[in-house]
Amino acid sequence: MSFGGRSLADSAKVYWDSCAWLGLINGEQDRKRELQAVYDQARQGVVELWTSTLSIVEANRLVAEMQQPKPIPPDSIQALDEMLFQRFVKLVPVDTDIARRARGLLRETPKLGKKPDAIHLASAMRWNVAILHTYDGNDLVHLDGKFHCDDGTPLTICEPSDPTAGGLFAKAKTNG
């Protein structure tokens, strides 16, 4: 099976930005099908999902809780944890190497302005995860093809697609 110009064997790792986790847990209508399909592929052992431990912080509440005053009841934390803390989800730390890389990316990359996105980008590159799924078109998707993982593999930055709809990780239709 091939997708996005890569074979499944070459792309057994997929990195998710925090917005992918939030889209799945919140059941966002325009994202849930694709995200659930990729998550199911990971659950079945077809792919590994990778993300930064920063995602634990960024995915801290459900959309239904966004307007609630603090302190927010801990009810949804279990659902968030049950999604992130799975054997097929590889959580990578924000260590000194990742922090320095992210800082460099922020200083050197036009139109990369969000610090968390720089951390996600640096993490995918460092851990050789050649596909980064995100919905952040303004900060990340437009950078598709501009970076390489540490092992030299080109980094694909795209929105997830449904593997049952013609390709597991199709590139985003628009860049920018």
Image (cartoon, rainbow, N blue to C red):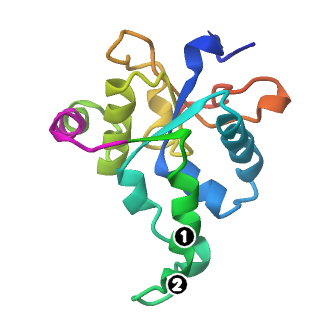
Measured from the top left, where is residue 29 in percent x and y?
76, 58
How packed mark 2 is, by other alpha carbons closer than 10 Å (few <14, some 14-19, many 20 or more), is few
Q: Residue at x 40, y 88 (%)?
A: 70
Which residue is at 56% across, 39% downward?
A: 88
Coordinates of residue 98 in the picture (x, y in percent): 24, 36
114, 169: nearer the viewer: 169
User: In this view of the protein, which residue sits in the foreground, 123 or 148?
Assistant: 123
Tell me, for residue 78, which label it has, or none: 1
Residue sitting at 65 percent across and 17 percent down? 4
> Quick check: 120 above or below 171?
below
**Residue at position x 31%, y 46% in the image:** 113
The stretch of residues the image draws in magenta is 92-104
Q: Which residue sits furthest right?
A: 165
The image quarter containing residue 139 is: top left
Residue 93 numbered tag? none
- The residues tagged by marks 2 and 1 sit, at their Cα atoms, a distance apart of 20 Å
Magenta span contains residue 103 = yes
Crowdedness of circle 1 by 10 Å Cα count: few (<14), some, many (20+)?
few
Q: Amino acid at mark 1?
A: Gln
- Report the quarter where the N terminus lies: top right
